[in-house]
Image (cartoon, rainbow, N blue to C red):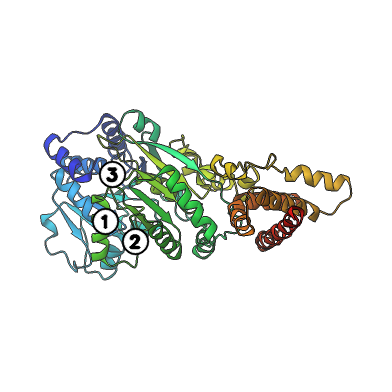
């Protein structure tokens, strides 16, 4: 449901759903019985109505207690949205933003909404002091920046709210700052009850071992750009879109600006209706782009980072993860952008080009949030790494591509069995590559009429080549990413040469 429609409904009914009422009662049981400075964390999936819930909590708390409430967010868009929702619940509030230097009128308000950095700066300058605060609500509580203000509210009850109770910094686990976690309804239950749209996920195997992990624990932008900007991945993305999301309003998430710009150019050249958005886009241009995206049925928006939170466009029908991530929070945030339900929309499409579903599980799979909250290190260590995921890949040539090789009976090669054969017969491992090259070259020559067409057809074997090289490297063991990349490049060069050699033989035989 669009946020403006939700606001209108709340203003008329002032009613909440059953699961929301139940969670609010659980939270107030702690508010009424736990120590006044208790730290409570509440989890509810994106789309479940966290802002609605803590707005009702604020209204009820102010009615029952003679103390003030502070709501903290990490982005200005969330500040504005939260303030509007609070007003819909008859909670008069004041936003503390960069223009607010002092609070001479603070006695007129019982509730304040503030960005974390802004409030921290005002408190440090000793220009602002909010008195008699009894409850502090932290939206998107998994961000560690909120720790900076905990000491300023030592005597207040702190309620953190998040869809994913896993700290953005593994070195600063959430259990260090919160006494307890209350888990709300699951994604699947919210789907079954008709509150969230159902996701259909299509995963495309991608070799990720070339990616590097940065100090923040996630893949670096540089290594992601190198992988996702190359022609093979751009073609894979275009193919996935045309196969599963053609004509649907689509959000494409990338890890780097260079990748997103490449996506923009690739889709634009293919004739698709697409725009690009990143954190360097001006406020005015961003507003225009988002307005265009909202009004255009087949719009495609490729972006970097900024649409994962504070963005709500219920008409999104397709989410493309054109990136890999090791962040469970980011995984849920990206897919959650498509989960809003409308009268004419009860499902949406997810295209995964980063092996993310294999790493975390499907978006609607059950998650033991209590385990993750209490033992985040153990959970993160138990995640499958890229080499393990890729070891289970099995390439199956798409039917459409198989038709292009219809003159060839056998297109399959079991690299692992071939490796066992070389060991048994004391052969060099490179004979596997030579055999594979000969098979691929023969396939291209058998199914074309000219040398140019054969070499052009060979480009469509990139996925099969990549798969065979990965299998070959796993058989060798302890192979560097650079060596594997070199093997692929060398293979493609030798394939071109092999096709030329076979075509010369073919021409001579025909003379």
> Residue 30 location in percent, x, y?
32, 37
> Residue 195 location in percent, x, y?
30, 34
Dot 3 or dot 2, earlier in sequence:
2
Instruction: Report, in whole angstroms, how far the alpha carbon at label 1 lies from the one at label 3.
Output: 12 Å
Residue corresponding to mark 1: 290
The outermost residue toward the front is: 511
Residue closest to the eye, 454 or 345: 454
**Crowd around label 1: few <14 · some 14–19 · many ≥20 (10 Å):** some
> Residue 315 location in percent, x, y?
28, 44
The kind of secondary structure element at disc 3 is loop
Mark yes or no: residue 329 visible. no
Residue corresponding to mark 3: 315
> Residue 269 location in percent, x, y?
40, 60
Residue corresponding to mark 2: 277
Q: Quick check: marks 3 and 2 in contact, CB under 8 Å? A: no
The kind of secondary structure element at disc 2 is strand
Q: Residue at x 53, y 45 (%)?
A: 204
Q: Residue at x 56, y 42 (%)?
A: 398
The outermost residue toward the bottom is: 125
């Amino acid at each position: 449901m669009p946020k403006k429609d939700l606001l209108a409904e709340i203003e008329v009914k002032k009613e909440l759903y059953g699961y929301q009422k139940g969670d609010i009662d659980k939270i107030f049981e702690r508010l009424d019985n736990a120590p006044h400075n208790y730290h409570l964390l509440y989890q509810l999936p994106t789309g479940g109505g966290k802002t609605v819930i803590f707005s009702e909590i604020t209204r009820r708390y102010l009615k029952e207690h003679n103390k003030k409430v502070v709501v903290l967010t990490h982005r200005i868009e969330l500040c504005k949205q939260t303030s509007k929702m609070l007003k819909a619940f008859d909670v008069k509030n004041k936003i503390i933003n960069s223009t607010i230097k002092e609070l001479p009128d603070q006695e007129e308000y019982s509730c304040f909404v503030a960005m974390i950095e802004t409030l921290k700066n005002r408190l440090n300058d000793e220009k602002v002091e909010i008195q008699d605060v009894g409850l502090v609500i932290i939206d998107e509580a998994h961000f560690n920046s909120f720790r900076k203000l905990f000491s300023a509210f030592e005597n207040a009850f702190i309620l953190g709210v998040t869809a994913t109770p896993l700290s953005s910094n593994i070195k600063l686990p959430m259990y260090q700052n919160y006494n307890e976690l209350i888990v709300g309804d699951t994604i699947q239950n919210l789907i079954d009850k008709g509150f969230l749209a159902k996701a259909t996920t299509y995963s495309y195997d991608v070799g990720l071992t070339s990616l590097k992990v940065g100090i923040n624990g996630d893949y670096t932008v540089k290594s992601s750009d190198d992988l996702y900007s190359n022609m093979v991945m751009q073609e894979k993305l275009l193919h996935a879109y045309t196969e599963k999301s053609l004509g649907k309003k689509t959000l494409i998430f990338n890890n780097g600006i260079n990748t997103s710009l490449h996506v923009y150019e690739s889709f634009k050249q293919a004739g698709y209706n697409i725009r690009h958005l990143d954190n360097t886009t001006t406020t005015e241009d961003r507003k225009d782009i988002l307005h265009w995206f909202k009004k255009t049925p087949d719009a495609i928006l490729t972006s970097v980072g900024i649409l994962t939170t504070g963005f709500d466009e219920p008409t999104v029908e397709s989410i493309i993860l054109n990136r890999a991530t090791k962040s469970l929070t980011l995984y849920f945030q990206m897919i959650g952008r498509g989960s809003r339900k409308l009268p004419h929309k009860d499902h949406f499409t997810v295209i995964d080009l980063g092996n993310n579903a294999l790493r975390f599980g499907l978006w609607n799979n059950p998650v033991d949030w209590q385990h993750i909250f209490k033992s985040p290190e153990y959970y993160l260590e138990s995640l499958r790494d890229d080499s393990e995921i890729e070891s289970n890949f099995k390439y199956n040539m798409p039917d459409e591509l198989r038709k292009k090789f219809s003159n060839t009976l056998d297109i399959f090669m079991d690299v692992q069995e071939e490796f066992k054969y070389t060991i048994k017969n004391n052969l060099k491992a490179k004979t596997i590559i030579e055999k594979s090259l000969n098979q691929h070259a023969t396939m291209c020559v058998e199914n074309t009429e000219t040398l140019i067409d054969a070499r052009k057809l060979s480009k469509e074997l990139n996925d099969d080549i990549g798969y065979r090289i990965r299998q070959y490297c796993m058989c060798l063991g302890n192979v560097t990413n650079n060596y594997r990349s070199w093997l692929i490049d060398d293979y493609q060069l030798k394939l071109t040469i092999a096709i030329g050699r076979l075509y010369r033989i073919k021409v001579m035989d025909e003379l």
